[in-house]
Amino acid sequence: MLHFDESIKIIDELMIKTHKTKKLYLCDALGYVLAEDIIADHNSPEYPTSAMDGYAFRYADIELGRLRISGINPAGSDLRDEAGVGECIKTFTGSLMPKGSDTLIPIENVKVDGDEIIIKEPVSMGFSVREEGENYTKNQCLISKGTKIDFAQIGVMASLNISSPLVFAKPTVSIISTGSELLELGELQTSDAQIRSANNYILEAIVQKYGGMPVQHGCIKDDKESITAAIADALAQSDIVVTTGGVSVGDFDFVKDVIYELGCEVLFKGVHIKPGQHIMVARKGDKFIVGLPGFAYSSTVTALLYLVPLITKLQHGTFALRKLKATLKEPFAKRTKKAEFTACNLTFASGEYFVDFQDKKVGSSAILTNMLGSTALLITQEEDTSKSAGEAVEVLLLY
């Protein structure tokens, strides 16, 4: 079995020959990854602009104490008046600064006396004037290729009149759960040996959350012919196929055999981790198959570790999950000589993150309820030993 770090290195170093791209209407691009640099084609603002409502004037006249109001300058108007000596022009937020003026004094700082203003509280030169290029300058790269589009990026692109940015297409992820004991939602239970499938639904949620387009194939019985047909069909119509179950060493674990027989290049099979040591990742061209274990907690953790990075890589993006340092509030007993990913409670107090294991059950890799609450994954490496309260640890955030 591979060392965990080696398996992650293989994922990190994967090269994608062709990334799929498409143009989307600006607001539909939310959550997608940019496939082009966004370059400013103009200065913003293009001319000195007022940042407040007030009176534009020549700063050299501030010592006069009184200025004559020679005009009014609404936002959006093509003002031709100039601010002459001893004059000011009433100007509004967003208006171009009148010719001849270099400073704006807010309405609150003056008293209007007929057609004049009396300066009650002076300002500094250039006050409340947005200089040319304050926001951005022409030919400046404002948003880099590979950036995930959020509301700020949409606002900036709108200001540049970009209605249809080029984005990387979200990868299509086919989801297959294998197991003759599995029941779909709403399916009638006819035997005590049957269990309700959760894996395919949590994987659909993970794919949606982290930027993929899920295609649900449901539950497949444990026979090789059915599994072969399902995986071959899914591989033909999607960028990633993710399966649960069938990758271990049992008599009915056919998924691993099918992956080989479909002519896929197996990148690795088996990693020294807990949970999920039988994880399998393969590729066929720029398509991938991720074979996850069948236990719910195990498949969830390995999906976060291996499926999510592949979804990101196919969009030329950066890995969505973050790590941070925290302090143990109670001792942690390391159970194996593997890299372990243990559900823990993560809290923040007095500027520091803390970890505890209250209500987290110790048992098999099937305890999905351990993921409920403000949960993170405590990371311990193969070489690590048990830890004491107060020690610093590394955790993987799930949000």
Image: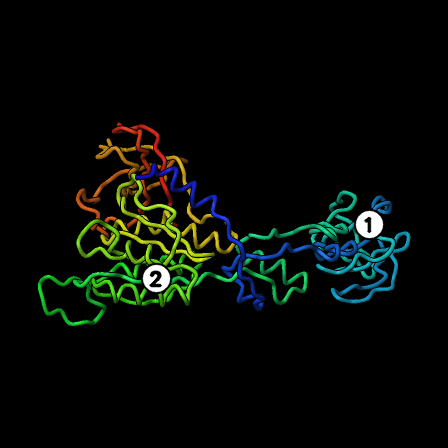
Viewer-nearest of discs 1 and 2: 2
Residue 183 in view (yes/no): yes
Viewer-closest of 328 and 15: 15
Secondary structure category for the residue under label 2 = helix
Examine the rendered structure and indicate whether residue 204 appears above or below residue 394. Answer: below
Return the mark for residue 204.
2
Name which quarter of the figure residue 254 lies in: bottom left
Find disc 1 in the rendering and name its residue: 102
Quadrant in the rendering for residue 72? bottom right
Residue found 38% across the figure and 59% down from its top: 207
Percent position of residue 215, x then y: 37, 66
Given residues 201 and 372, the one toward you in this image is 201
Question: The residue under label 2 is which amino acid type?
Answer: Glu
Left/right placement of residue 370 relative to residue 327 reads left
Q: Residues within 10 Å of mark 1 (few under 14, many from 20)?
A: many
How far apart marks 1 and 2 lie (CA) works out to 58 Å
